[in-house]
Image: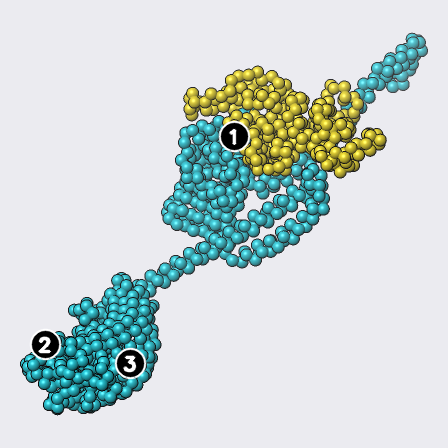
Amino acid sequence: MIPGKYRSVSGRATNNVEFKLNKDTPSFPGRLLQHDLERNYSSRQGDGRVISPSPRSKSSCISSTTNVTELYGLEMKTATSSLSAFGDSSIQTSSKSRIRQGCHSAGPNVSGDHINLVSSSMPSFPILQRSSEEKILYSDRLTLERQKLTVCPIIDGEEHLRLLNFQHNFITRIQNISNLQRLIFLDLYDNQIEEISGLSTLRSLRVLLLGKNRIKKISNLENLKSLDVLDLHGNQITKIENVNHLCDLRVLNLARNLLSHVDNLNGLDSLTELNLRHNQITFVRDVDNLPCLQRLFLSFNNISSFDNVSCLADSTSLSDITFDGNPIAQESWYKHTILQNMMQLRQLDMKRITEEERRMASILAKKEEEKKRENQKQSLLKEKKRLTINNVARKWDLQQRVANIVTAQDRKDSDSPSQDPCQIDGSHISASPEETGSLDSGLTSALQGLSVIDSHLVELDGDTLSLYGSGALESLDRNWSAQTAGMVTTVSFTFIEFDEIVQVLPKLKIKFPNSLHLKFRETNLVMLQQFNALAQLRRIDQLTIDPQGNPVVNFTLWKYYVLFRLSHFSMQKINGTEVTQNDMIMAERLFGILAHVASSELPQYRLISILGDARKKQFRYLLETKGKKPGIVNEENNDSKRLIGENTNRATLNYTTRDFYNERLEEIKEKKKFCKMYIEDLVKEATEINMKNEALQKLWPQMFIELVRDAVIEIRNKNSYMKLCLQQITDQK
Amino acid sequence: MLSPERLALPDYEYLAQRHVLTYMEDAVCQLLENKEDISQYGIARFFTEYFNSVCQGTHILFREFSFIQATPHNRASFLRAFWRCFRTVGKNGDLLTMKEYHCLLQLLCPDFPLELTQKAARIVLMDDAMDCLMSFSDFLFAFQIQFYYSEFLDSVAAIYQDLLSGKNPNTVIVPTSSSGQHRQRQVLGEASMEGVEASLFYQCLENLCDRHKYSCPPPALVKEVLSNVQRLTFYGFLVALSKHHGINQALGALPDKGDLMHGPSLDEELERLLVPRSPGLIQLGHASPEASWPAFPDPSRLAPLEALHHIPENDGSTEETDD
């Protein structure tokens, strides 16, 4: 393949230029490739050797002419050594003898005879003339290597020249060669040229070597339509441009330039080899527009991801590529990603790709893909979680605001008529409820709109169960496996009304028997008494109440109250702070009396009813599950007995959720109504009786006297009374 | 029932006025509420306990607000219970916010309205900076006035507003000529002085006390409060009331300010509670005569009576409910 390239080059150069040599010596193209890839050279020279037809071994012969070239303006014959060298130029090893021969024949001693470098009419340009002998011998080639030339000499009478070599001079500008219209090969390697110019007439030029110069821009190549090889390595080119017309170009060397990216490559329809080593390329585009590209060298650039070179995957012709010295080559996925994406590849980083590697690559790629998918799933879940939490938070926020407005309204409604002596402005008071009312309805409708989306989130992460949103509490009804549930030691509640949490605490106690750490955030803990509800749990080691959304934490006494009320748990940490003995004593000092008063001064019947209430509440749930799990219920019974035994004097301090409490108040109201009527009736009856009694008491003395008087009057006449009595007796008979 | 006033009223009204009906109703209500429990140890026993606890003032513990505020006796009992339970907080020297005091109140009465606490805090803070910290005694005495005389203060506030806006709510009592003078003077003084004129204010209040059916502070003491100043604001008046020694005594629920932190029997109790935890660590207040509250027999004195029934009943009921 590689020799073939040059064979065809020479084939197209339809004349007697000795490209034939290349055919005969496969070592040359081999060497070309070797240099090209700089396998062994890291110096700049490595790139410089790309196509140079003159082997280094010749320098010894050339050096002899250096003394001559210093004399610019003088008429002298110089540097003919190169001329003689030319014929052997591309032969490195196989025809060494000929090189030497050339050296001898065109050695320094001879050069003076054959070539005249004379100053022209314009003093600055030397004029080169060769002897006719030379001309005949090397009619189509001319080598002016290492002549310390600072300008191109005027080459007279050499119109048939096909090959011109100016290697290793100090030429700053391409000049005086426009008459060499047959030129096919022009070598200006290692000069000081700053701009490509003066080539517009060289229409048949096929090989242009401008390596190691100072060119900043690719330009002025418009007429070089048959260019086959273009070497611009070791310049200062920052971007690829003005090459789109070079449809015959097969080799382009841009190594060691300042390219930051690769694109604008369309039109290079014959390009088979592209060397871009040692640039600062971060991305590659357009490579898929090169139908013949087989070798692409991207070593030592700044490519860090495959996405930046993804167009390579679309190239069908590419068979050889290098990426070594790029960040991408350090990645673990490098090799298999490349292989997976570029099935057509035969060599990667100068190594043949085996079937095995390819198989491995596809397996790895599959794994990678899976992992990626998994990651994506994870991040999707994460995102969903974030969204849900946001949503829950928003809903919570709205709820809170609605609640606030409602209570504010209630308060205003209740006290606006008289209470607040400072609110003189009556109109203001009457206006505000309306205002808040409308706002209220607006918020409520927004709330309903939101509820369409996920309104809660349950997350089990290791030993932590996190619940977001009140809906999440329902998850406690789920069938948790004993193992999972047993693992959970931390339960965190966020965006849930504490009163709702209270209702599920018995469930929590049963389902997650090992939960020791409770976290509350945005749960609307506002009162100390709410902590009473936690007393019914089995055990709490740690309690974390986030100040956010829990105003109770702002109280100076809250911690002591918690310690006091939950003293039977002997908690270790509250809000991450270790509980000390002093804290416990302080808590006892502050609230011990309350417990004492509550337990010892409460009338017996109330004590029973309050304790009973607490337990009834606990049992409500237990009764529901009784049928299923009698064992647990029994255990619970013992548990609650123990709990009350531990803690009699503070068990009276319990918490009923607001709804439940209101319900109870309602009940009490009913009862009260009845009692009121009942007592009213009773008292009325009693007072009536009392009144009658009193009236009777008042009348009685008088009545008694009257009765006695009547009786006395009746029996005053003894005889007649007797008669009357007898009469009555006989009548009865 | 032996008071001579009794003869002036029909029995029913008399009972109602003395709140006997309230307690009877409540007793029956409680009986209904706890039918099962009470039936185990006898209805007579229940009534004994109930009225005993009413006498001791412990009947209001953890009761609903509507009951707690139903009678002056209940109110006084609640004040006293509050003082007894949280005296230690004051003793500790903590300054608390209105909200925190409210929480403490709610520990004793779950549905205690925030509004009342707010009003009490307004008295302490002179109606501004409601988030400020207050000392226990300041709050307690302000709360006492606000809670015990709640309805009275509402009426006073209305009168005060009327006076401020130039109306005289008691035109019948106050001679028109003088009221006219007052008004003029008030208009003149308003630019430089805050509040209302004290003597006029007192006249209105005296009248109010006469016809007020709720409890109000003794008019003589109100007069005393008002006689010290020329003019005063509403909150100035309330502050003066809350700080007035005599009114506190007349109310009879709380000890004098100086003795507020004392309470030997409770301290002993507390010490007893703390001893198992930390022997010798706590030395609470020393004994002082606890004589100034005749309305409340010390519950410890009644202890033997309760002790008779205490233990067996407790055990029985615990087992019952556990089943």
Q: The cyan chain is which one?
A: A
Colour setting: by chain
Q: Which residue is drawn at 62% across and 18% down?
A: B292
Q: State which tag comes first along the sequence, 3 or 2.
A: 2
Q: Which chain carries label 1?
A: B
Q: Residue B45 in the image: x percent, y percent?
A: 60, 24
Residue A654 falls left or right of residue B207? left
CB of mark 3 within 8 Å of CB of mark 2? Answer: no
The residue beneath circle 2 is A64
Asked if badge 1 and badge 2 are on a common chain, one would say: no
Please rate how many residues cluster around mark 2, counting C-alpha atoms within 10 Å: few if below 14, some from 14 to 19, many from 20: some
Which three-letter amino acid code belongs to the residue tagged 2?
Ser
Secondary structure under tag 1 reads: loop
> Where is residue B278 shown, x and y percent of the image?
42, 24
Image position of A92 with respect to A406: above or below: below
Identify the residue under disc 3. A197
Give SS at disc 2: helix
Task: Say which of marks 3 and 2 sits in front.
Answer: 2
Q: Mark 1 points at which residue?
A: B94
Side of A129 relative to A247 (left or right): left
Tags 3 and 1 on a common chain? no
Amino acid identity at mark 1: Asp
Colour seen for chain B = yellow
Q: Distance between the residues labelled 3 and 1?
A: 93 Å
Q: From the viewer's perspective, is residue A345 above or below residue A126? A: above
Local secondary structure at mark 3: loop
Estimate the spatial distance between the alpha carbons at disc 1 and disc 2, rounded to whole Å: 106 Å
Categorize mark 3 by other alpha carbons within 10 Å: few (<14), some (14-19), many (20+): few
